[in-house]
Image (cartoon, rainbow, N blue to C red):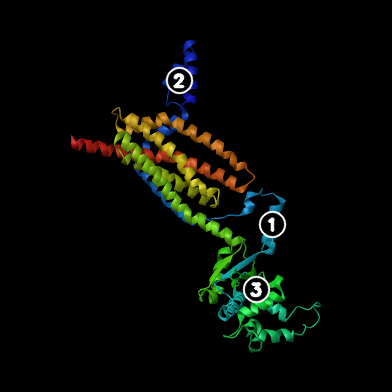
C-alpha cells in the first residue's frame, strides 16, 4: 500500500521527464494472456451458471466427505529426516519386532484407600482378563504385567537359576505369613490363589510387602501423606504400536471393569495412547475451528459491506467461495493421502487467509465496475479481464514461495507445501469460476428489486 505505489510513481515520473513512458502499456490492460484466460471464464456467469453451482456443491460435498474421513496422524519421527539412521532403525524395530524401543502400557488405579479386599480381588480379576486382550504379551497363560499381585506371586515361586532344573519349593514360612493377612493360597489356582478373604487385612499385607522388598513393591504401590495406600500401578508389556493405541486403550478399560465397577478411578496411558489422544484432539477441534474461522470472516465482510455500501448480504456472497476453498483443500489432502497432523491442521486457517484476499479483490473490482451503470454480466467480464493478471500473478508467486517447502527433508513441511499449493489452486478456481456467478445473481436481484420499487 505504500512502498510499491511510491516506487511506481517515482519510476513513472522519471519516464515522463525523459518522455520514454510506454503509454500503450496502460491502454492494453486486459490484453495479456492471463487476462484473456480469466475473461474467458465470464462465459460461466453469462450462460453456464449451473457450472458454478455444480462446482461449489461438488467441491463442498466431496470436501466435507474428505474432511470427515481424513486420517489424523502424529508421529514424532516425522520431524526427523526420513533418511536418518535413527528413523530407519526405529522403523525396523517397530515393523519387524512389534514395539519399537519397547512398549509398556500403564494402568493407574486410584481411590482414597486401595488396600481393601474388594479392590485387591477385583485387581486379580482384571489381571486375569488381560490374557484375552489382543496385543498384550502373554506367557504361560498369564499376561506380562508388573503389579503388586505379580510381584507377590514371584515371591512365592521364585524363578530357578537353572532352566533345566525343577522349580524350587515354595517358601512355606512366607505362605504362613501371608495366611495371617487372609491370603487364600490353598483355596485357588493361579492368580486366584492370591485373593484374600472378605475380612482379610490387605492394608497390613501391602505394608508387609513394602517392608520386605521396598524396591520392588514401591513401583506398584503409592502411600499418600496420610499414610494410606491411595494408588496402584500396573505396567503391562504390549505391542499395539501407534496404529493400535486406541484399540488397546479401549480393551484395557474393558479388562479393568471389575475395578471401575467398584467406583475406582482407572486410567490407561502410554506414549502411543498419548499420541492417539493428540490425534483425536486435533481431529475433534478441527471442525469447530473451521466453522468459527469462516463465520468470523463472514461477519467481518458483512459489517464491512454494511458500513461501506449498505449491502450486508454481499459479505455472505463473498465468503461462500471461501468455504469451497477450505473444503477443497481437505479434498486435496484426502486424495493425496496427506493426514492431519500438528502442521497440516493449521492450514484451514491459512486457506481462509489465502482465499479471502482473492475473493475480496474480485468483489471490490466488480463493485467499482457496476457502479458506472454497466449491466452485471458485462461488468463481471470487465472485472475478470482487468483483474485476471493480478490474480494469476499473486497465485503463482505465492505458489513459488510456499512450494519450496515440498523439497524439505521433513515430511510435515513437505505436506504443508503441497497443501498450500492445493489451497491456492482452489482459491484461483473459486475467484474465477464460482464467485462471478454469485455476484451476477446478487446484482440482478438488486436490479429487479430496485425496478419494482420505482
- For label 1, the crowd category at 10 Å Cα-Cα, with few meaning under 14, some 14 to 19 and many 20 or more, is some
- Give the residue displayed 69% in from the left and 57% down from the top: 90
Kindly state the secondary structure of the residue where label 3 is placed: loop
- Percent across and percent down for residue 96 are 69, 62
Q: Quadrant of the C terminus?
A: top left
Please tell me which of labels 2 and 3 falls first in the chain.
Answer: 2
State which quadrant residue 300 falls in. top left
Dot 2 and dot 3 residues touching (CB under 8 Å)? no
Residue 139 seen anywhere in this rendered image of the structure: no
- Give the residue displayed 64% in from the left and 69% down from the top: 235
Kindly state the secondary structure of the residue where label 2 is placed: helix
Cα–Cα span, label 1 and label 2: 61 Å
- Percent across and percent down for residue 69 are 49, 56
- Percent across and percent down for residue 317 are 35, 41
Between circles 1 and 2, the one closer to the viewer is 1
Q: Residue 112 carries which label?
A: none
Please give the residue where the numbered disc 1 appears in the rendered image: 90
- Give the residue displayed 41% in from the left and 34% down from the top: 361
In this picture, residue 63 sits left or right of residue 163: left
- Percent across and percent down for residue 132 are 60, 75
Please give the residue where the numbered disc 2 appears in the rendered image: 25
Dot 3 and dot 1 residues touching (CB under 8 Å)? no
Which residue reaches farthest left? Answer: 454
Between circles 3 and 1, the one closer to the viewer is 3
State which quadrant residue 28 falls in. top left
Q: Residue 147 carries which label?
A: 3
- For label 2, the crowd category at 10 Å Cα-Cα, with few meaning under 14, some 14 to 19 and many 20 or more, is few
Amino acid at each position: 500500500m505504500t512502498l510499491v505505489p511510491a516506487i511506481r510513481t517515482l519510476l513513472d515520473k522519471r519516464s515522463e521527464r525523459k518522455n520514454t513512458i510506454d503509454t500503450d502499456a496502460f491502454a492494453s490492460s486486459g490484453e495479456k494472456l492471463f487476462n484473456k484466460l480469466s475473461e474467458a471464464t465470464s462465459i460461466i456467469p453469462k450462460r453456464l451458471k449451473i457450472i458454478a453451482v455444480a462446482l461449489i456443491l461438488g467441491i463442498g460435498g466431496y470436501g466435507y466427505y474428505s474432511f470427515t474421513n481424513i486420517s489424523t496422524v502424529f508421529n514424532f519421527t516425522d520431524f526427523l529426516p526420513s533418511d536418518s539412521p535413527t528413523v530407519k532403525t526405529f522403523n525396523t524395530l517397530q515393523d519387524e519386532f512389534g514395539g519399537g524401543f519397547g512398549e509398556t502400557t500403564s494402568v493407574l488405579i486410584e481411590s482414597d484407600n486401595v488396600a481393601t479386599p474388594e479392590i485387591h480381588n477385583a485387581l486379580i480379576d482384571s489381571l486375569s482378563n488381560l490374557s484375552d486382550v489382543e496385543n498384550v504379551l502373554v506367557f504361560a497363560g498369564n499376561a506380562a504385567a508388573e503389579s503388586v499381585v505379580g510381584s507377590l506371586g514371584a515371591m512365592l515361586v521364585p524363578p530357578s537359576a537353572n532352566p533345566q532344573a525343577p522349580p524350587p519349593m515354595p517358601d512355606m514360612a512366607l505362605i504362613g505369613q501371608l495366611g495371617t493377612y487372609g491370603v487364600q493360597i490353598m483355596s485357588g489356582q493361579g492368580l486366584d490363589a492370591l485373593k484374600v478373604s472378605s475380612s482379610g487385612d490387605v492394608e497390613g499385607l501391602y505394608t508387609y510387602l513394602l517392608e520386605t522388598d521396598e524396591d520392588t513393591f514401591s513401583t506398584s504401590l503409592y502411600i499418600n501423606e496420610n499414610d494410606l495406600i491411595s494408588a496402584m500401578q500396573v505396567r503391562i508389556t504390549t505391542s499395539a504400536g501407534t496404529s493400535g493405541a486406541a484399540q488397546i486403550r479401549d480393551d484395557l478399560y474393558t479388562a479393568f471393569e471389575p475395578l471401575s465397577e467398584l467406583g475406582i478411578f482407572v486410567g490407561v496411558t502410554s506414549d502411543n495412547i498419548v499420541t492417539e489422544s493428540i490425534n483425536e484432539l486435533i481431529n475433534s477441534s478441527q471442525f469447530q475451528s473451521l466453522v468459527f474461522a469462516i463465520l468470523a470472516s463472514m461477519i467481518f465482510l458483512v459489517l464491512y459491506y454494511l458500513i461501506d455500501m449498505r449491502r450486508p448480504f454481499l459479505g455472505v456472497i463473498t465468503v461462500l467461495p471461501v468455504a469451497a476453498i477450505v473444503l477443497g483443500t481437505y479434498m486435496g489432502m484426502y486424495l493425496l493421502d496427506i493426514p492431519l497432523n500438528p502442521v497440516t491442521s493449521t492450514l484451514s486457517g491459512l486457506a481462509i487467509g489465502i482465499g479471502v484476499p482473492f475473493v475480496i479483490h474480485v468483489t471490490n473490482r466488480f463493485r467499482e465496475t457496476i457502479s458506472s451503470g454497466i449491466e452485471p454480466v458485462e461488468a463481471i467480464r470487465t472485472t475478470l479481464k482487468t483483474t485476471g493478471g493480478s490474480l494469476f500473478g499473486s497465485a503463482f508467486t505465492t505458489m513459488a514461495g510456499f512450494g519450496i517447502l515440498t523439497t524439505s527433508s521433513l515430511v510435515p513441511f513437505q505436506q504443508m507445501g503441497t497443501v498450500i499449493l492445493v489451497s491456492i489452486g482452489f482459491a484461483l478456481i473459486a475467484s474465477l469460476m464460482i464467485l462471478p456467478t454469485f455476484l451476477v445473481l446478487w446484482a440482478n436481484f438488486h436490479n429487479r428489486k430496485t425496478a419494482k420499487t420505482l
